[in-house]
Amino acid sequence: MQLYTKIIIGMALGVVLGFLVGPNSAMLNHDGVRLTNAARILVEGRAGAAVATNSSGIRSAKIIERKGDKAPWLKVKWQLSNKDVFRLQKAAQDALAKKTGKPSAILGAKGPKYKIGAAYSGWVKNVEPAVSTYSLFGQTLVDYTEWIGRLFLALIKMVVVPLVFFSLTVGVASLGDFRRLGRLGGRTIGLFTVTTVMSLIIGVGLANIIKPGDLMSVGDKAKLLASYEGAATNTVANAADAPSTMDQIIAIVPSNPVASIANGDMLQIIFFALMFGIALTLLSEERSKPVITLLDNCNEAMVMLVHIAMMLAPIGVAALLFKVVGSTGLSVLVALSVYGLVVVAGLMIHLILTYGSIVKFGAKLPFLPFLKAIRPALMLAFSTSSSSATLPVTKECAEDNLNVSNSVSSFVIPLGATINMDGTALYQGVAALFIAQIYGMDLTLGDQATIVLSATLASVGAAGVPGAGMITLAMVLTAIGVPTEGLALVLGVDRLLDMFRTATNVVGDSAATVLMARLEGDDLKFLSEEDDAANPKKGFEGRVDNEPQPVESDVSDED
Ligand code: ASP
């Protein structure tokens, strides 16, 4: 069976199992409850004593009894935290003080004793927006299988930094001509800007026509705001640290390249590799050749590592999707379905119109076979929601399946994975309008132009990791004066939409790569599986299986 067939089976399995037995499963009994912010538990047997959730937002409790299905109360059991004990004791003392008329300070430690960590039971109102139920068994399953996805992801991510460094240095050194490099760089950045603005025009246009925000009910809005409030505040806090655009440009030049490599700072690594490659071309061949050969061999070893890690992909993606689908509540999906559909429709239009034209008319390749050639990267982007983790596979697809040269792919793809995020930009455009519509704010044409500009910058600033677009969305909202608490409205489906926008980001990078390769005169063509078989250096499975053979035959030749 082909690797991508196995990956598709893994993805399907992850999604189906996620819906069936994930923590929010419709099939399993919901015996756990998550309480956020405003929820209060009335402690049993202690009149008036209640604990609110802790300031970080969420706490979980086990449901042990329900009172009816309509307007129900849930009886829950949970363990007292330090804060709970403090609050309960204070509440009890205040009550006693009221009853006896003595100031609570005099009563001192009198009154009921609560123990930290002891199990208590109490009642909570199920109708409050801050309460959501889930399956404890499903959650346990997710907790126990989560490591598989994380392990797979770590294996691929391990390769990203050395791969970019080795391949880009070798790529630049083999370009051998600065003018070519300058031309490639200028064209690539120009194309990235045009496609990002295109994606925003599509997203903002759609959100204006369909107006998903006007279609949401008041009840759903209150529920979403209450459930995701805490998380939205955290997101805004993270966004506050984002540096200014000028600082970001200066920060591309690393003062210590070893630190950039250690921190995985992609733009700095790209800059250093470019300069290092240029320096190598200026040395005499006697000096540069051994270095380039060494780096080239290191690069090949990294590529081999990607192929080894990809053998785990089917299981890895199943585990990743199981977690994502299992942790997203169905009710959130329903409430945000129109918004989600507008985002996905916008991404599809951008994919077909913008990328379709670039690939067909620019790179002169038929679009569907092109998508087929980058299938492994697409599926990985979708299941990991990280264009940076997908990078090694995107690069392999371009080189192995489309015959793009290393000098083009090693420049365009890492740069694209870092700054070219059309899917993220489009998503931010729709989200900003959606939130403004819910708040009943009318955005002028000028505001909409500000969205296009700020979302373009925000998508450049977003890292290629899950949820990055959500953090920089706070910048876009601030730019047009929409309250950032509005992030709470879209947070519930962010992880799911992230899969679609990351896949779009990766197609965008690949489309730019083939166009640049065509302009640089690469001999673009679809390499078939027979090509793979004929050339042991090609193909995801072929390489791992076949690589040792030439070495063996070398040995026998010498015999
Ligand atoms: N996850 C996206 C990516 O890696 C970025 C984002 O939109 O959050 O491309």
Image (cartoon, rainbow, N blue to C red):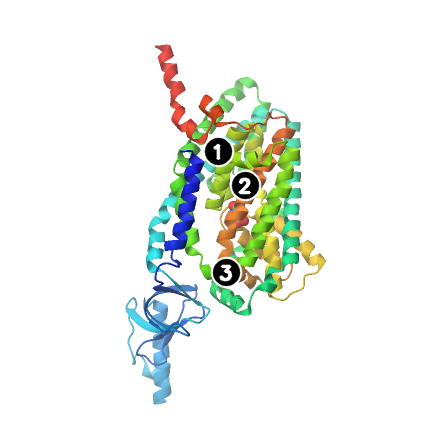
For this view, does 491 lie left or right of residue 34? right
Distance from Cα at disc 2 to Cα at disc 1: 17 Å
Distance from Cα at disc 3 to Cα at disc 1: 42 Å
Badge 1 density bin: few <14, some 14–19, many ≥20, Cα 10 Å: many
> Which residue is rendered at x = 32% and y = 83% of the image?
107
Q: Residue furthest bottom?
A: 101
In the image, the residue with mark 2 has its CB under 8 Å from the nearest atom of ligand 1: yes
Foreground mark, 3 or 1? 3
Q: Which residue is mark 2?
A: 506
Q: Which residue is mark 1?
A: 163
Q: Quadrant of the N terminus?
A: top left
Q: Nearer the viewer, residue 211 or 445?
A: 211
Q: Secondary structure at mark 2?
A: helix
Question: Where, by quadrant of the figure, is residue 100 drawn?
Answer: bottom left
Up-down: is 276 above or below 417? above
Badge 3 density bin: few <14, some 14–19, many ≥20, Cα 10 Å: few
> Which residue is rendered at x = 41% and y = 54% of the image?
19
Q: Are marks 3 and 1 in contact (CB under 8 Å)?
A: no
Q: Secondary structure at mark 1?
A: helix
For this view, does 149 lie left or right of residue 292? left
Q: Nearer the viewer, residue 318 or 432?
A: 318
* Residue 473 percent location from the top left of the image: 57, 55
What kind of residue is marked 1? Leu
* Residue 210 percent location from the top left of the image: 63, 58
* Residue 223 percent location from the top left of the image: 49, 67
Q: How many dots with numbers?
A: 3
Distance from Cα at disc 2 to Cα at disc 3: 28 Å
Q: Residue furthest top?
A: 559
Sequence order check: which comes first, mark 3 or mark 1? 1
Q: Which residue is mark 3?
A: 334
Q: Quadrant of the C terminus?
A: top left
